[in-house]
Image (cartoon, helix red, strand yellow):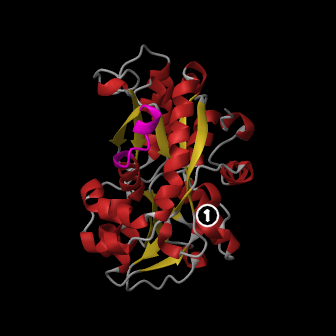
């Protein structure tokens, strides 16, 4: 397979998003725009972009339990591939109303001229559980023990220049290693287990339930980098375009209110999410039952978002300090 070794894909996604946002409305693939309008029963259609992770199952559970319908919303999940950055063009054109992303996606996009807002928190790292969110995993025969040992190794992340790259670099530095000596390649979470087994990578960033796929074959987690670097309070957030939050604040308000009710329910009902994983993600039922899940919370910590921004500058992902106060939407 072709493993990407530059940030070209991520940068290209932002560039495409900027180009498309200046064009007439239309979907990325030329079809009718999916966002906006009304669905049957008088509900407002809301499109939500999401990358392959256990959050797909979580959102499906929230939808099935009626949290969005209660607020007049027909939520339509649009599952992308790889990372959230790939869906930025659809957010820019209005084909997506909202999308799941790391704060890095929003912060990086704003430094390149795209008007993106963080509207709500989604997941938090549970400090008591190592395998609940994204972590670095290795195969059974690996000699890598801690983050420092990643120095000189090839490590996959789901998005070059994203939370994985800055978080792992910082974890290596905190553990006494040289973050500049880590080579990053881009792989989606579902690919990690096979590429570790094939020897194509030394270690990989993966999320639940894909962590469990590696562990079930004798592998292990060597770095809980989200927790270790202080990024866990806002690991994933919901983002939208500046255009939508300004032109349709009622839609944003109803969506965020639905989420405020749904997210605590999801934290308290993890088994429902595990049960939904086979259908939502194609996860093996046995692996799904072992999946460790993050905490779900709508809260946004400006301090944590600022830390993301600082690390983006520290590791040369962006040239200018992102304006955190502007990026965070305030009702």
Q: Name the residue under label 1.
A: 169
Residue in the foreground of this view, choosing between 96 and 6: 96
Crowd around label 1: few <14 · some 14–19 · many ≥20 (10 Å): many
In this rendering, position of residue 285 left or right of residue 82: left
Residue 310: image x %, image y %? 72, 51
Residue 131 position (above or below residue 302): below
The residue depicted at 65 percent of the width and 64 percent of the height is: 170
Label 1 element class = helix
113 with respect to 56 (left or right): right
* Quadrant containing the C terminus in the rendered view: top right
Residue 266, compared with residue 300, is above or below; it is below
Q: Give the range drawn in magenta.
A: 63-72
The one of 310 and 224 positioned closer to us in this rendering: 224
Q: Can see residue 16?
A: yes
Judge by depth and name the residue closer to the eye, 205 or 231: 231
Q: Which residue lies furthest to the top in this view?
A: 24
Residue 198 appears in the figure: no
Q: Is residue 297 found left or right of 306 in the rendered image?
A: left
Q: Position of residue 74 (x, y in %)?
A: 37, 34
At x 44%, y 55%, the residue is: 158
Position of 326 relative to 121 (above/below): above
């Amino acid at each position: 397979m072709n493993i990407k070794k530059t940030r070209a894909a991520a940068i290209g996604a932002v560039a495409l998003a900027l180009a498309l946002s200046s064009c007439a409305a239309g979907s990325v693939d030329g079809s009718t725009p999916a966002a906006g309008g009304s669905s049957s029963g008088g509900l407002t259609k809301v499109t939500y972009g999401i990358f392959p992770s256990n959050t797909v199952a979580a959102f499906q559970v929230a939808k099935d339990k009626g949290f969005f319908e209660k607020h007049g919303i027909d939520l339509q999940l649009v599952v992308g591939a790889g990372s959230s950055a790939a869906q930025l063009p659809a957010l820019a054109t209005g084909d997506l109303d909202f999308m799941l992303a790391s704060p890095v996606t929003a912060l990086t996009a704003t430094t390149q001229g795209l008007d993106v807002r963080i509207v709500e928190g989604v997941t938090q790292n549970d400090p008591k559980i190592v395998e609940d969110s994204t972590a670095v995993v290795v195969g059974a025969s690996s000699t890598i023990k801690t983050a420092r040992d990643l120095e000189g190794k090839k490590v996959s992340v789901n998005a070059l220049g994203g939370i994985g790259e800055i978080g792992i670099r910082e974890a290596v530095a905190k553990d006494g290693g040289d973050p500049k000596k880590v080579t990053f390649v881009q792989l989606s979470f579902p690919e990690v287990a096979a590429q570790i087994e094939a020897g194509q990578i030394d270690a990989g960033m993966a999320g639940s339930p894909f962590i469990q796929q590696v562990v079930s074959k004798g592998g292990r987690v060597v770095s809980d980098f989200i927790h270790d670097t202080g990024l866990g309070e806002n690991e994933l957030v919901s983002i939208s375009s500046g255009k939508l939050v300004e032109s349709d604040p009622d839609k944003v308000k109803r969506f965020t209110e639905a989420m405020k009710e749904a997210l605590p329910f999801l934290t308290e009902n993890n088994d429902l999410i595990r049960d939904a994983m086979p259908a939502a993600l194609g996860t093996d039922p046995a692996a799904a039952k072992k999946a460790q899940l993050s905490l779900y919370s709508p809260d946004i910590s400006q301090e944590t978002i600022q830390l993301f921004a600082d690390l983006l500058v520290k590791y040369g992902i962006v040239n200018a300090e992102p304006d955190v106060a502007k990026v965070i939407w305030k009702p």
